[in-house]
Image (spheres, rainbow, N blue to C red):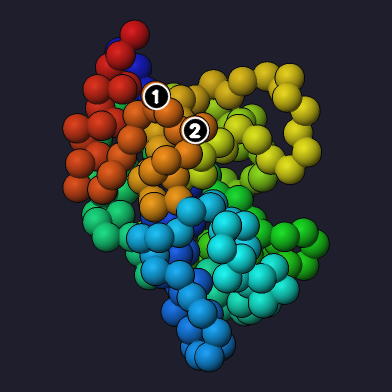
């Protein structure tokens, strides 16, 4: 019997174009303020970029605006790749997203991500949707995520148990030089998912 491998996929900046959406909304909301080219972004959180261009208050106001997550464009090739992956024998694909903020803000974010999945992938994909801030507790063989270290969240202690999955870095400008990504496998574009994911699943 063929072994089934769980492949977990983050949404923001992996399946959905969070970076492009944020830049578009920032420039529309603050046309007179400076902004950063997408290729020059250096930190996972927009308000942590070393130049200090995106302050926390204005950044969070944009990110929490109703419709922000719902109206993101897909990353190039993502929708087709997810469907191909789901049809690949021996792979069980799950979308493993995290909500932004807490309380009502987090609920709104999760609801919009569910709407995005339904629109772009179809209602059946909602059965594959997981939303959690603690991704390390989700079982799987691989997690494709652009965050340099998706095992840590907030003030987690350093001695938390390691996740079952291996982190595959979805390349974004802010993680190209991140020390946490050193030595990890990378997926640079969805067109090459078979060349990256399948050998990793076959590895002992």
**Foreground of the two, 52 or 144:** 52
**Foreground of the two, 201 or 91:** 201
Mark 2 Cα-neighbour bin, 10 Å: few <14, some 14–19, many ≥20: few
Q: Is residue 160 visible?
A: yes
Q: Position of residue 94 (x, y in %)?
A: 45, 41
Looking at the rendered image, the quarter that the N terminus falls into is top left
Q: Position of residue 98 (x, y in %)?
A: 60, 51
Marks 1/2: CA–CA distance: 9 Å
What residue lies at 29% left-to-right and 31% top-to-bottom?
197
Is 86 placed left or right of 168 in the picture? left
Is 130 placed left or right of 156 in the picture? left
Tag shown at residue 179? 2
Q: Is residue 144 visible?
A: no
Mark 1 Cα-neighbour bin, 10 Å: few <14, some 14–19, many ≥20: few
In the rendered image, the vertical position of residue 156 relative to residue 31, given as above or below: above
Is 45 placed left or right of 197 in the picture? right
Tag shown at residue 17? none
Is 49 placed left or right of 5 in the picture? right
Element on which disc 2 rests: helix
Q: Are marks 1 and 2 in contact (CB under 8 Å)?
A: no
What residue lies at 39% left-to-right and 51% top-to-bottom?
172
- Mark 1 vs mark 2: give the one in front: 2
Q: Position of residue 15 (x, y in %)?
A: 39, 55
Residue closest to the far top: 204
Q: Position of residue 79 (x, y in %)?
A: 30, 57
Residue closest to the far front: 51
In the rendered image, the vertical position of residue 94 relative to residue 4, given as above or below: below
What residue lies at 67% left-to-right and 77% top-to-bottom?
58
Element on which disc 1 rests: loop
Looking at the rendered image, the quarter that the C terminus falls into is top left
Q: Which residue is mark 1?
A: 183
**Foreground of the two, 110 or 155:** 155
């Amino acid at each position: 019997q063929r072994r089934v491998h769980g492949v977990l996929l983050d949404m923001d900046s992996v399946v959905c174009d969070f970076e492009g959406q944020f830049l578009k909304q920032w420039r529309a909301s603050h046309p007179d303020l400076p902004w950063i080219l997408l290729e020059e972004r250096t930190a996972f959180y927009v308000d942590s970029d070393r130049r200090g261009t995106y302050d926390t208050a204005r950044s969070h106001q944009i990110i929490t605006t109703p419709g922000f997550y719902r109206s993101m464009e897909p990353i190039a090739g993502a929708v087709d790749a997810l469907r191909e992956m789901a049809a690949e024998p021996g792979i069980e694909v799950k979308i493993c997203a995290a909500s932004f903020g807490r309380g009502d803000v987090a609920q709104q974010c999760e609801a919009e991500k569910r709407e995005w999945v339904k629109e772009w992938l179809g209602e059946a994909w909602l059965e594959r949707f997981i939303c959690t801030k603690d991704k390390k507790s989700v079982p799987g063989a691989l997690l494709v995520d652009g965050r340099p270290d998706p095992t840590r969240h907030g003030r987690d202690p350093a001695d938390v148990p390691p996740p079952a999955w291996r982190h595959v870095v979805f390349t974004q400008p802010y993680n190209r030089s991140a020390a946490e990504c050193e030595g990890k496998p990378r997926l640079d574009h969805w067109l090459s998912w078979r060349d990256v994911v399948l050998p990793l699943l076959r590895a002992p």
